[in-house]
Amino acid sequence: VWAALYHQLHDPKSFQVVKFSQQSTGFTRYSSLNLEEHVKEQLSGQPIDIAVISFGANDTQGVMHKGRYAALLSPEWKAEIGARVARYIAILRAQGAVVYWVGLPVMRKESFDADIRGMNAFFAEEMSRIGVPFIDTRPMSVDEKGQYAAYLADPETKAPRLARANDGIHMSMRGYERLVSGLAGRIRHYVSRARKLAEAQG
């Protein structure tokens, strides 16, 4: 997601697109990396105006909640992960960042996709509750029949283009650009409007 936004937004005169993401992390994996503490360290050296978040593929597992194991998407899991996500976003907002949450695309393996659908629904509900725009990428990651496909039609030429990685989970770079093109346009519009307002206020 970061690389796709970098390709579409990076302009030394207008945008600096900074990578905060790290592989193999997640809100269920605080034993390896506490995301809340980590983002505090990142923000201390690099203040940001807009934060684009995408999590979930590594979070299809249980989590400890009040000293007990909570299964994926159980009420206890939702309570624990919801609290972690809310605190994480509060940290970003406290330093003035506008936050967007990018949902996950369709997965090739049906059982894994069922978990991802459930997580997308959970995160979309949480984002709605705390006022964060949720970017649903599933419609942009399927073919005309609404099915998983490695090749998807180019929006302009309609020619088939490789959109997925071989693992059936990640996108190709062209695929990621497809998922975030609308968000990139939304960010450009937001920044342009904010700059005009700032100029008008002198």
Image (cartoon, rainbow, N blue to C red):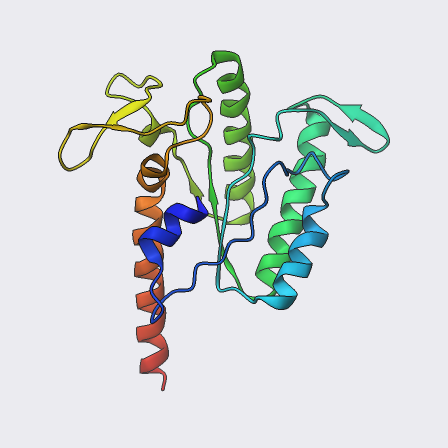
Viewer-proximal residue among 2 and 166: 166
Residue sitting at x 72%, y 36% = 80
Residue 159 position by quadrant: top left
Q: Is residue 11 left or right of residue 53?
A: left
**Which residue is most to the front?**
166
Closer to us: 53 or 31: 31
Which quadrant does the C terminus fall into? bottom left
The residue sitting at the left extreme is 157
Write the residue at 49% across / 23% down: 117
Tally of marks? 0
Q: Quadrant of residue 30?
A: top right
Relative to 2, say whether 43 is above or below: below
| Residue appearing at x 35%, y 65% in the figure | 191
- The residue under the point 33% across, 64% down is 11
Q: Nearer the viewer, residue 116 or 13?
A: 13
Q: Is residue 31 above or below residue 142?
A: below
The quadrant holding residue 158 is top left
The image shows residue 186 at horizontal and vertical percentages of 33, 53
Image coordinates of residue 146 in percent, x first then y, are: 30, 19
Task: Indicate the position of residue 20 as horizontal and vertical percent values.
Answer: 56, 53
In what quadrant of the picture does the N terminus appear?
Answer: top left
